[in-house]
Each structure stands twice: as structure tokens, then as C-alpha cells.
Image (cartoon, rainbow, N blue to C red):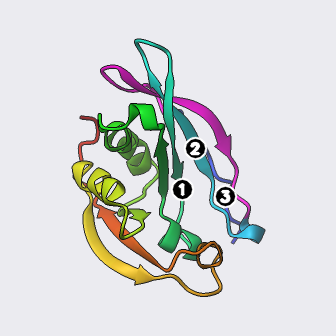
Amino acid sequence: MERQPFKFLDPGVLADGELELVLVRRVPGDAARDIVPSYEFNMVNTRSGEVMGGINLRIGFNQRIKYGGQVGYAVGRQFRGKHAAARSLKLILPLARRHGLDPLWVTCDPDNAASRRTCELAGGVLADIVDIPQDSDLYKRGDRKKCRYRFDLHNAKGGV
């Protein structure tokens, strides 16, 4: 049976007051390199137009995702403290649901209190803390453990 090519969806408007996720690019997957397709967004302050950070959504699940998660985010230092990452994570939940991701997995370092709080504020539940396999890219860069947060999307509302 031949596999159907991945189809990116129109994410629509992903906004929450002065925070809007602006699609920067769609990245096709590469099965040979074990890379799943993804969306990349800028977190934009709609009042000032400033880019506050970024968030990406990876569509699929494999060994890399088990430890690296299906969502990655970063917020610029000057924009921290206003829950931009948690709000952005909530904003992409409907898109993840439309792609059939259930559950959605987000990972972070155990000692990253801000990222752990982001996951909790967005509705994630700590499922476990896992050891990183020695043959993974994460291990090679120095990571040894990851917290894995589970987001059950079948009944999640998304948004704020």
C-alpha cells in the first residue's frame, strides 16, 4: 500500500488579544532522516509588530519526537513573564487536533522551571521523566533526561 503524501493545512488565524502566531514556513518531512513535517510560527505582538519569539508544531510521532516533543518554543528575554509561550501553545492545539495528534507531546528539561510551568498553564500533564538514549542527538548535545507532558486533544478546546 502506497503512503499518501502529507498535506499541510491552512492554520487560519491564531490570535489571542495582542498575541498572534504568524506562519513563517512549512517544513516537509524527510523520512530518510527521521524528520516529521512541521509548521513554524513567529509569536508577534499585534500592537507593536514585534516578534516576541517562535513556536513550531511537528506533525507525527517517532523516536526523535518521543524525546524532543511535537512542539518547540522560545521567547525573547524582553518578552518573558507574560505567558507568551503558554498562550501560543494553546493557540496551536486546534491545528494539532485537526492533524489527528492525540495525545500531543511536549518535552522540556527537568530543571527548566519556566518551560514546565508553560506546559502546565497550557493544560499539559506531566506523564513521566525519561532518560535520553545515548545514541540520540539530544544526548550528544548534553541532555540526559526530559520531562514529557501529555496534552489530550480529543476534548481540549484550545484558544484561551
Q: Nearer the viewer, mark 1 or mark 3?
A: 1
The residue most toward the top is: 47
Residue at the (43%, 43%) spot, across then down = 95
Q: Is residue 5 left or right of residue 132?
A: right
For the residue pair 106 and 158, the one nearer the viewer reads as 106
Q: Is residue 9 visible?
A: no
Quick one: label 3, few (<14), some, or many (20+) residues within 10 Å? few
Residue at the (27%, 54%) spot, across then down = 117
Q: Quadrant of the C terminus?
A: top left
Quick one: label 1, few (<14), some, or many (20+) residues within 10 Å? many
Residue at the (65%, 36%) spot, across then down = 25
Please give the range of residues in magenta.
11-30
Q: Are marks 1 and 2 in contact (CB under 8 Å)?
A: yes
Q: For numbered disc 3, what is the local secondary structure?
A: loop
The numbered disc on residue 59 is 1
Q: Amino acid at mark 2?
A: Tyr
The numbered disc on residue 39 is 2
Q: Is residue 97 visible?
A: yes
Instruction: Say which residue label 3 marks.
Output: 4
Q: Earlier in the sequence, mark 1 or mark 2?
A: 2
Residue 65 position (above or below residue 56) = below
- Residue 18 colored in magenta in the image: yes
Residue at the (58%, 44%) spot, across then down = 39
Locate residue 134: give its quadrant: bottom right
**Helix, strand or loop for the magenta stretch, by majority:** strand
Q: Earlier in the sequence, mark 3 or mark 2?
A: 3
Locate residue 110: give its quadrant: bottom left
